[in-house]
Image (cartoon, helix red, strand yellow):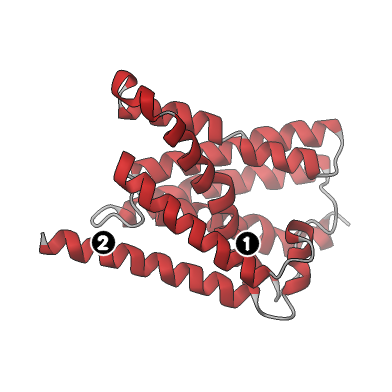
Amino acid sequence: MAEAGWSMRWQWGVYAALVAAAVVLAAIPAVKPYFAWFFGPLNPAVVALAAGAVGGVSLFILRRSYGFEILKQGSTARGVAVGLGFATVLGIAIVIADVLFRYPHDINAPMPQALAFYPSIGLVAEILFHILPLTIVLTLLLPLRDRLGVDQTVIIAIALVAVAEPTFQVVFGDGTPAVSVYTWVHVFAIALLQLHVFRRFDFVSMLSLRLVYYVYWHLIWGAIRLKVLF
């Protein structure tokens, strides 16, 4: 019991630290303008704090009802390594697509603001596109859990939730039909892999996949592409 209690305190402590970091980064004046496309006139630090609270409640429900973890002792390192591998493959794929299709030149936040913007928006996006929808869908599927089993229910929910982020990006994005189709498929693949990592490992591993992908796409290639493609 003592080990389980320590484990839960550690999980929530890590989650609170992640939310606090997102709020602080979102509050930096030079970074605030880059949140406007997503949040409009809303204060990004307040949005990050609210998302963190919603995410905390959602993670509590997911852990209690389906066994998801924020941080799983003994397997997080492996989960982060798996996420790094997925992020690398996906990063290469989006760079190739950018060379072929040419995404807009201003798609990435510039340095050094990007160093604060992407970690903060990454946590918020993870909660709004994955954690909260997964909680809602799995809660709705609770009556079927005993009939289908936990694993089958989670697989169905993951497939449904993975549609949210790519659909959002295509509907509110600006691109040719070819770009839109590729973007939807690419982001859908990211969502599926992230949710798989969440189920197989933990939330920290899932978030790591997104953040490492951001490093490849938005930071490294984001700086190179302006000189190479434009």
Judged from this view, the residue extending furthest toward the top is: 147
Q: Say left or right for 31 vs 201.
A: right
The picture places residue 221, in percent across and down from the top left corner, at 70, 58
Gap in Å between the C-alphas at discs 1 and 2? 25 Å
Seen in the picture, residue 66 relative to 152 is either above or below; the reply is below
Judged from this view, the residue extending furthest toward the left is: 1
**What SS does tag 2 mark?**
helix
Q: Say left or right for 148 vs 220.
A: left
Which tag is nearer the camera, tag 1 or tag 2?
Answer: 2
The picture places residue 128, in percent across and down from the top left corner, at 58, 50
Tag of residue 8: 2
Q: Residue at x 69, y 35 (%)?
A: 184
Q: Residue at x 74, y 57 (%)?
A: 38
Q: Say left or right for 136 vs 108.
A: left
Instruction: Find disc 1 in the rendering and name its residue.
Output: 121
The picture places residue 142, in percent across and down from the top left corner, at 38, 30
